[in-house]
Image: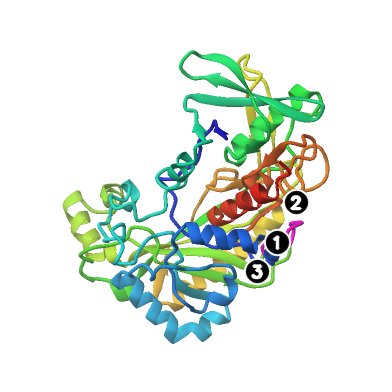
Amino acid sequence: MVFLLRRGLANGWGANALSFDDDDLAQWPVSFSDMESAYKTVYERIPVAGPDGDDLAPHLRGVYPSQPPVRLSASDDRLLKTYERRKHALGRLGVKIGRARLAVVTDPSRTDACDYSGRCLWGCPNGSIYNPRLSTLKQCEAHPGFRYLQGRVVLALRSSDNRIDSIRYLDSATREIREEPCGAVFLAAGALQTGAIFLRTLRDSGVNSECRSEGLMDKTVVRIPFVALRSLGQGPDPRSFQFNRLIAAVIGESAPWPSYLHTELLHLTDLIYHPLIERMPLDSRNSAKLFFAIRHAIGAATLFFPDRITAGNHQVLAEAEGNPETVVLRYRDSEDKERFIRQSVARMRSALHRLGCITRGVVRSEPGAGIHYAGTVPMGTGPRRCDATGRSNRFSNLYIADGAAFPSLPSKPITMSLAAHATRVARLAAL
């Protein structure tokens, strides 16, 4: 097997690990039972820390923790205890809170267990947080038939008789465009790059006169900053985990959207504070004093909004500055998604108020500028899509093995579902 392209944000992801259930997969030609075996394989490969059960467990089918939950900060613990006392009132809003499920080693008997050094964002020194560069790629390199070829930027795939026969790439060292013969191709360059490579492949085969993708989906990310009044004046935690230790869900019937809206609750731990201090309405010295008195009460609820394929949202090939390989993204949020966002944000703000928090405004990602993309070569019918096994409808030996194949984008974190989809595609491939 030849591996030509490595993409992703392995060092920057938040480690949240959940699975899609049948409600999330309602618009897919695939059910949870079709995916379950692949999910179990992924959870066997990737250690996940989480509780045996909590109020969120009934909504998180297919999550298999193998590690104890990540330790809470004092502010987290106080917020969770407040929730336990007021859960019935929050239940009327459809809001539930529980421990985060995170791809982190926490078992103290292991040498790579989290030691709460507070260096998560800069790269865990213990390797406690799952990172495919340090684990999955290393496992692949142990196979004698595997080669990882660096310095090659894949542009397109060459085809004849509806089969891919070579990979066209740019050699980054020589700046020459070359071709590599191939058999079966598993395309998993990230949804945007996979879509771009697929578009150029269709163009070169003469099938796609419009030169645009079938879809483009993006998770809108909305953060609600808050101050937890019960944590004002609290002393610092001696050691901490920088990512969210708690998660929440806004649960309700909001067709066509999934009933589970994923939210991550984070209190500040060890970060770069200077930008926050400088925005306070005092001189630097007094701003610093005030900030460090309240910092452990400062937090944010981050909501991740799902998406579906919508007319007008797609990738398109468009020559720019003489470069015929340029791919442009066209995206806007639909009116029903905007309405869903407004309603859900209002419910979460009400829940935070009942938890004794003061909220202030929202911080929202620009349309099309979130952190999770999907649906550029989605499952479905037609030459610009793939089938339920990930195989291209146009090219019989091409498999879409990443989120480009997703026909909808649920709210839950996608990493484990990306891995499960790729696992299932590989198992079902007609090689």
Name the image quarter holding residue 110: bottom left
Q: Determine whether, in the image, residue 117 is placed left or right of residue 24.
A: left
Question: Mark 2: which amino acid?
Answer: Ala
| Label 3: few (<14), some (14–19) or many (≥20) C-alpha neighbours in 10 Å | some
Q: SS at mark 2? A: loop
Q: Residue under label 2, please give it.
A: 388
How many numbered markers are drawn? 3
The span shown in magenta is 24-31
Depth check, mark 2 against mark 3: the one in front is: 2
Question: Mark 1: which amino acid?
Answer: Asp
In the rendered structure, which disc, 3 or 1, sits on the residue that comes first in sequence?
1
- Residue 361 appears in view: no
Q: Position of residue 23 (x, y in %)?
A: 69, 67
- Between the residue at mark 1 and the residue at mark 2, the CA separation in whole angstroms equals 10 Å
User: Residue at 66% of width from left, 41% of height from top?
Assistant: 331
- Going by the picture, which residue comes out furthest to the left? 285
Q: Closer to the camera, 13 or 158? A: 158
Instruction: State the mark number for residue 259.
Output: 3
Q: Residue under label 1, please give it.
A: 34
- Between the residue at mark 3 and the residue at mark 1, the CA separation in whole angstroms equals 21 Å
User: Residue at 38% of width from left, 58% of height from top?
Assistant: 243
In the rendered structure, which disc, 2 or 3, sits on the residue that comes first in sequence?
3
CB within 8 Å, label 1 to label 2: yes
Please identify the quadrant where the N terminus is shown.
top right
Q: Does the magenta segment cover residue 95? A: no
In the rendered structure, which disc, 1 or 2, sits on the residue that comes first in sequence?
1
